[in-house]
Amino acid sequence: MPVDNDVARVLGRLGLLDPAAMSEVDMQALVERAVKANRAYETWWLVKRLGEMLCLVAAPSCGECPLNAACPSAVCPPGGKKPKKPAAVNKPKAAKPARKKAAAKKKR
Ligand code: SF4
């Protein structure tokens, strides 16, 4: 079962491998021990496809990822988008002109 960059990145983000500390041969040996031979191609294909379509290098689409709930590297909740930045300042609301007119009518 080949462990290329896509497979190493996905399995690394899932916490199953440590691509920074392991050689490609070590990662391949570990994966081959963990996955049954009759499931190897299917597993490789699913992981590879996840790495090409969702778990991208720069901006993973974690909100759409089926492994989101189990992934320690997920950047947003399942089905969610990246959290928005909170508003920097809460500006006071400007007085509405309609209220001024109503207050003026009451004084009359
Ligand atoms: S949840 Fe995000 S980081 Fe984890 S495998 Fe899916 S796309 Fe990659």
Image: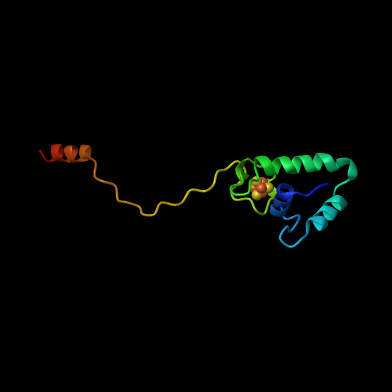
Q: Is residue 72 visible?
A: yes
Residue occupying image coordinates x 70% and y 42%: 50
Query: Residue 12 at what x, y percent from top left?
Result: 71, 54
Residue at image position (60%, 41%) is 79
Q: Given the current orientation, which residue lies at the most extreme bottom position?
A: 21
Task: State the image quarter where residue 100 is shown.
Answer: top left
Residue 5 located left or right of residue 85: right
> Which residue lies at the image location 62% right of the left edge and 45% below the top edge?
62
Report the number of discs. Answer: 0
Relative depth, front residue between 92 and 74: 74
Q: Nearer the viewer, residue 106 or 7?
A: 7
- Judged from this view, the residue extending furthest toward the right is 37
Q: Is residue 66 visible?
A: no
Q: Please name the colour scheme applied to the rendered image.
A: rainbow
Quarter holding the C terminus is top left
Q: Position of residue 107 (x, y in %)?
A: 12, 41
Q: Is residue 68 left or right of residue 25?
A: left
At x 85%, y 43%, the residue is 40
On screen, residue 42 versus residue 51, left or right, reads right
